[in-house]
Image (spheres, rainbow, N blue to C red):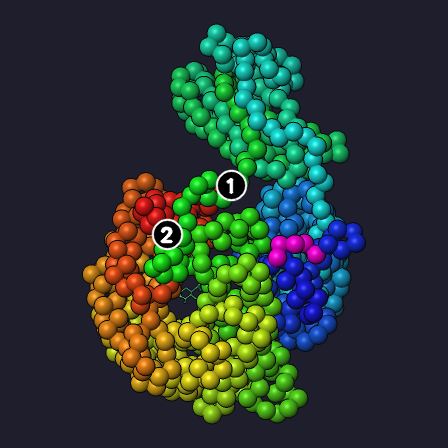
């Protein structure tokens, strides 16, 4: 566990833990939840279990498989630094819950799905599996039974003590490629790929023509010294006159240890008699030779290519001279965002985020599902007989807290008490879902202990970093003037909210701001419930503010209702006479499609919202978007954020900084 902490901390700093051999070694012992790097594949569900373990008390349990060997668990390779061309070694212990013997493998989860390591073993026996490899494709890794061990396709399995060693990629001495074809003085290094017969010639208008083809792979091709692991952008114009709507494509033939293999990179419907553009991208694998070529159409179709380009796809975050959200709003409120572990692993990305945002929230990593450790709590009860035992572990939030501390930025904690993303075991005797729910007294003691440990540990290890907390999240019902029915209301009663704030106030460092946070709080009836909750907490004197989650959608969110909700909430005062604080805690604005017309509507919506927010300067202390880039949003299909998948500002960004 210590080791894991050190490594997580090192990852958070984005300094690979430089061992003697320049390797980063990460051990997963699954003692405290499913690490974010492990992702579900197919119908499988990875959870942590104490049924069997290779060491310690728990292991990673893969259940819910539905008859496919790819119902499995994947390792996010990029998040571990296992990129194309980087040497890596994985050792893992596997236990397959089956009467049969079979073969268990570590394989690529995409691309050519190649097996990287395998082991044959009997059922119900811990067996060690090793894969020593470097990837030639940018893919994740999958732990699964082999294709031919079909008897295991429904079997649950366990993994434990997974050790991932990641080495360093070889530095390339090749100059970066930035090539554009020029056929003015000949074929420019292009040659005809065919068994004989096909030939290239330069046409009058600067294009390259291929004739004499007898197979669809007969093509104009050219060798390129691609650098392993580097991303490239490729484009080419193509034209054919003979067929109606054939497909032409850019492909690559790569050779490794003498054997050639192929990938199709991009296609176009080559309309008869028209120049058509093919654009595609490719991350270079580790190969000795790479040939890019254009193929397809009919076996005998003549076609032309021109303006073939290939250049390194250099990632830039934001743009030079981009205005900064946090600076534009500095004298009004803190501009914040939520981050996920994958983003934290990307040093340059985080450096850019730091220029834009003043406060950060963990997207998931401080929720009870991540901090509460049911298996350790269960063990503690077994030892002491004390049902109020609560064990917590902080592995998941250390990367963000470390980064925030080292970069001098603030963190908003999210969230102490919630009906969702909270282990169900928390509410049961012996932390066992088959046993009855605990009494109100035991549950309150567990809640107090949890809140105390989380607030005290974070303050002790990262003093001053967390400036505010969502103490209770989403307690209002979606319909009816009442609280949501949940295990909290069932076991404790409606005052669970008041008790949570009482404990949070008791253990929070002085000056830490405590918020109640909810969604749809502009919908009239729900608005009433959130005000009822706030009034009760204000009477107790335990709350500082209200958080409007603000997950909106262009076309369905009613901005007038948002205005009313803000106005009504803003009327409230705290016991000392100061106004109730407000925060927009999880703003995102969904749109129907990722196109210019919708970006404009989204920009208008964001602009109107911020005009409203500006009326509450002084009382509204922070506005956080729920994430930064569309592709990593929890509503990625709605493109709701200020930056696109390439970390480039969208019209909505400009609407807020202009
Ligand atoms: C979301 C996260 O963004 C997702 O990654 C996760 O799968 C589910 O939770 N209201 C909240 C947030 O308070 O915690 C939720 O975050 C979004 C809705």
Query: Is 544 or 96 nearer to us in this picture?
Result: 544
Image coords of residue 514 (percent x, y): 41, 75
Placement of the N terminus among the 4 image quadrants: bottom right
Look at the picture and state if 466 lies above or below 227.
below
Image coords of residue 488 (percent x, y): 42, 82
Residue located at (38% from left, 82% from top): 542
Quadrant of residue 15 in the image?
bottom right
Q: In the image, is residue 527 part of the stretch drawn in magenta?
A: no
Is label 1's Cβ within 8 Å of ligand 1? no
Query: Is 583 or 221 nearer to us in this picture?
Result: 583
Q: Which residues are magenta?
A: 13-17
* Number of the label disc, if any, that sits on residue 431: none
Residue located at (74% from left, 67% from top): 126
Q: In the orientation shown, which residue stands out farthest toward the right?
A: 20
Image coords of residue 574 (percent x, y): 31, 79
Q: For numbered disc 2, what is the local secondary structure? A: helix
Q: Quadrant of ligand 1?
A: bottom left
- Between circles 2 and 1, the one closer to the viewer is 2
* Number of the label disc, if any, that sits on residue 328: 2
**Which residue bears the numbered disc 1?**
316
- Please tell me how many numbered marks the rendered image carries: 2
């Amino acid at each position: 566990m210590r080791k894991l902490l050190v490594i997580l901390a090192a990852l958070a700093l984005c300094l690979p833990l430089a061992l003697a051999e320049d390797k980063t070694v990460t051990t997963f012992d699954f003692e405290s939840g499913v690490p974010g790097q492990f992702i579900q594949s197919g119908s499988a569900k990875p959870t942590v279990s104490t049924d069997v373990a290779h060491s310690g008390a728990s292991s990673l349990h893969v259940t819910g498989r539905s008859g496919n060997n790819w119902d499995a668990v994947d390792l996010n390779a990029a998040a571990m630094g296992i990129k194309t061309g980087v040497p890596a070694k994985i050792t893992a212990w596997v236990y397959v819950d089956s009467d049969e013997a079979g073969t268990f493998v570590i394989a690529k989860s995409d691309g050519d799905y190649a097996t990287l390591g395998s082991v044959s073993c009997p059922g119900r026996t811990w067996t060690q599996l090793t894969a020593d490899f470097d990837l030639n494709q940018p893919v994740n890794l999958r732990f699964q039974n082999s294709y031919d061990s079909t008897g295991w396709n429904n079997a649950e399995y366990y993994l434990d003590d997974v050790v991932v060693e990641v080495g360093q990629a070889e530095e390339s001495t090749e100059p970066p490629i930035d090539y554009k074809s020029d056929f003015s003085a000949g074929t420019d290094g292009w040659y005809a790929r065919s068994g004989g017969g096909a030939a290239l010639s330069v046409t009058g208008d600067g294009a390259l023509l291929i004739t004499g083809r007898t197979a669809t792979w007969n093509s104009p091709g050219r060798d390129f010294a691609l650098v392993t692991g580097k991303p490239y952008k490729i484009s080419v114009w193509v034209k054919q006159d003979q067929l109606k709507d054939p497909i032409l494509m850019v492909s690559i033939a790569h050779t490794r240890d003498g054997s050639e293999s192929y990938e199709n990179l991009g296609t176009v419907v080559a309309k008869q008699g028209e120049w058509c553009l093919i654009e595609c991208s490719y991350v270079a694998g580790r190969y000795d030779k790479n040939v890019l070529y254009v193929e397809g159409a009919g076996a005998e179709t003549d076609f032309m290519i021109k303006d073939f380009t290939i250049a390194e796809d250099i990632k830039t975050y934001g743009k030079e001279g981009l205005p900064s959200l946090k600076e534009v709003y500095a004298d009004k409120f803190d501009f914040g965002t939520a981050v996920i572990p994958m983003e934290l692993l990307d040093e340059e990305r985080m450096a850019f985020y730091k220029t834009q945002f003043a406060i950060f929230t963990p997207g998931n990593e401080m929720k009870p599902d991540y901090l509460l450790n049911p298996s350790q709590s269960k063990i503690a009860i077994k030892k002491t007989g004390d049902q109020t035992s609560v064990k917590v572990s902080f592995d998941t939030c250390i990367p963000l807290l470390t980064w925030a501390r080292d970069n001098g930025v603030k963190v908003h904690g999210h969230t102490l008490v919630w009906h969702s993303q909270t282990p169900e075991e928390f509410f049961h005797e012996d932390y066992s879902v088959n046993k009855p729910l605990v009494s109100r007294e035991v549950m309150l003691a567990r809640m107090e202990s949890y809140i105390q440990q989380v607030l005290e540990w974070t303050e002790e290890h990262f003093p001053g970093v967390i400036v505010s907390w969502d103490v209770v999240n989403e307690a209002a019902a979606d319909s009816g003037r009442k609280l949501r029915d949940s295990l909290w209301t069932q076991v404790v009663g409606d005052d669970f909210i008041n008790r949570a704030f009482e404990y949070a106030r008791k253990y929070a460092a002085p000056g830490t701001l405590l918020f109640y946070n909810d969604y749809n709080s502009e919908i009239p009836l729900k608005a009433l419930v959130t005000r009822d909750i706030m009034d009760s907490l204000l009477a107790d004197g335990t709350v500082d503010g209200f958080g409007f989650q603000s997950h909106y959608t262009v076309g369905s969110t009613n901005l007038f209702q948002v205005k009313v909700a803000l106005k009504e909430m803003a009327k409230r005062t705290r016991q000392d006479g100061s106004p109730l604080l407000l925060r927009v805690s999880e703003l995102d604005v969904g749109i129907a499609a990722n196109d210019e017309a919708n970006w404009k509507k989204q920009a208008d919506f964001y602009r109107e919202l911020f005009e409203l927010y500006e009326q509450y300067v002084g009382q509204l202390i922070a506005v956080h978007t729920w994430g930064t880039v569309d592709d990593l949003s929890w509503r990625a299909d709605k493109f709701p954020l200020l930056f696109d998948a390439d970390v480039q500002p969208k019209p909505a960004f400009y609407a807020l900084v202009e």
